[in-house]
Image (tube, rainbow, N blue to C red):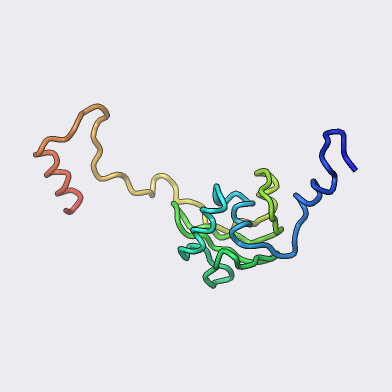
Amino acid sequence: MHTRLGICRAAVTYAFRMAESVRVDAWLWAVRVFKSRSLATAACKAGHVQLDGARAKPSSLVRAGTRVVVRGGPRERILVVRQTLAKRVGAPLAAEAMFDESPPPPPRAERPAPVALRERGAGRPTKRERRDLDRLRGR
């Protein structure tokens, strides 16, 4: 049976149907933690993803209630699965599919400031300035 747009209702239902369990790399991609599924797979293979405290393979299955820890990038993300999604969905639906227990990022005042800044357009540093920069950086 087709709708007015010519899309089969069964296909639409399949795209948003929740499975009981789904692969962790597919779920991380579907809830928009990673931009592509291959990036999610690479993070799992590199050991940056944990499921309930254990290292996750890309083919590991997640269910509702599973705790997913993603390390890498600027901070650690702690996510609890609310819904299993096999297909990528919009940002509002992705936010509903997980509960984010990550600690908030530190305020700007507590972030470390860059050690040495040069004015924009100042050109390349001279030999003397390079030695001063190296001394500041501890090289």
Residue 98 spot, x, y in % from top left = 65, 56
In percent of the image, x 65 and y 65: which residue is there?
A: 62
Q: Quarter of the image containing the N terminus?
A: top right
Residue 90 vs residue 45, the one in the foreground = 45
| Relative vertical location of residue 50 with respect to residue 136 in this rendering, above or below | below
How many labels sit on residues? 0
Query: What residue sits 83% from the left and 36% below the top?
Result: 6
As drawn, the residue found furthest toward the left would be: 128
Asked which quadrant contains residue 40, the reply is bottom right
- The location of residue 100, given as percent across then percent down, is 60, 56
Judge from the rendering whether residue 17 lies leftward or rightward of residue 44; answer left or right: right
| Residue located at (27% from left, 29% from top) | 120
For this rendering, which residue is in front, 48 or 108?
48
Q: Nearer the viewer, residue 31 or 46?
A: 46
Can you give x and y, in whole percent of width and height, for residue 30 in the image?
A: 64, 51
Give the farthest residue toward the top: 121
**Most distant residue in the right direction:** 1
- Which residue occupies 84% across, 48% down? 10
Q: Is residue 117 left or right of residue 23?
A: left
Q: Is residue 61 above or below residue 100?
A: below
> Does residue 133 appear left or right of residue 80 in this picture?
left
Q: Is residue 23 above or below residue 32?
A: below
Location of residue 91 with respect to 118 vertically, above or below: below
Q: Position of residue 65 (x, y in %)?
A: 68, 66
In the image, 135 versus 89, the foreground residue is 89
